[in-house]
Image: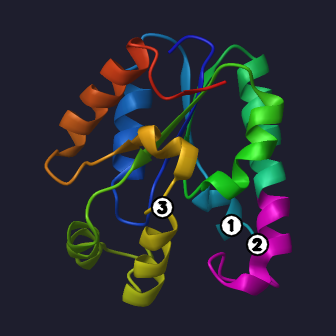
Amino acid sequence: MSGEVIILTGPPASGKTTVAGLLASNADTPTVHLTTDLFYRAIKTGFILPYLPESQRQNEVVVDAIVATVRTFARGGYDVVVDGIVGPWFLPPFRSAFDNLAYVVLRPSLATTLARAEERVGDELKDVDAITGLHGAFADLGVLEAHALDTGHLDATQTATEIRRLLAAGSHRLA
C-alpha cells in the first residue's frame, strides 16, 4: 500500500474499523489507521449527530479536518487507511487532495448489518433507524457501484484479504 490513501467506508456495523485495523497493522509499509469517528467525538459542545440534515456544516468542517490530517501523514511518507462513513457526497475534498486514492465500500445486507449492530458494545451506534438510513445511503453508488464489496459472507480477516487482492489488482482506485 505504498503511498496510498484508502478510504474504507460503508454503513455503521459493516466492519470498517476492524478491517481497517487489520489492513494497517499487517501492512508492509508504514501505515496509519485513521478513524473518522475520533474527529466527531472531539466536538464536545455543539455536536450534532452527523446523520441528521442539520449537521451538514459540521460534517463539512470535520471532513476538511480529516483530509488535512490524512495529507499530513501522507506527506510524511505514511500510507493511510481512512475508516469512516465517507459517502460519495464527501469524496470531492479527498479527490482534490490525493492522486493515489482508493475507495472501498463494505456493503453487507441490511439484515447482516443490523445483526452486527446488535452485537456492538460501548457507545457505538446501535440505533436501527439511523443504521437503516445510512445503509440506504450506500445502496446505490451510481458510477462508484464497482467499489462496493458484499462482505456479508466474509469475516474480517477474509474481508481484509479480499481488499488487499483488489488493491493489488488496481481495482477500486479513483481516477
Provide residue 149's location: percent of width, then percent of height: 33, 43
**Secondary structure found at label 3:** loop
Query: Does the segment drawn in magenta span residue 55?
Result: yes
Pointers 1 and 2 in contact (C-beta within 8 Å): yes
Provide residue 80's location: percent of width, then percent of height: 59, 29
Circle 3 sits on which residue? 138
**Colouring of the image:** rainbow
Pointers 3 and 2 in contact (C-beta within 8 Å): no
Q: Residues within 10 Å of mark 1 (few under 14, many from 20)?
A: some
Describe residue 169's horizontal placement relative to residue 39 as left or right.
Answer: left
Circle 2 sits on which residue? 43
Q: Give the range drawn in magenta.
A: 45-62
Circle 1 sits on which residue? 40
Q: How crowded is mark 3: few (under 14 residues within 10 Å), some or many (20 or more)?
A: many
**Which residue is nearer to you in this view: 34 or 67?**
67
> Where on the picture, by quarter, is residue 59?
bottom right
Above or below, 67 against 72 in this view is below
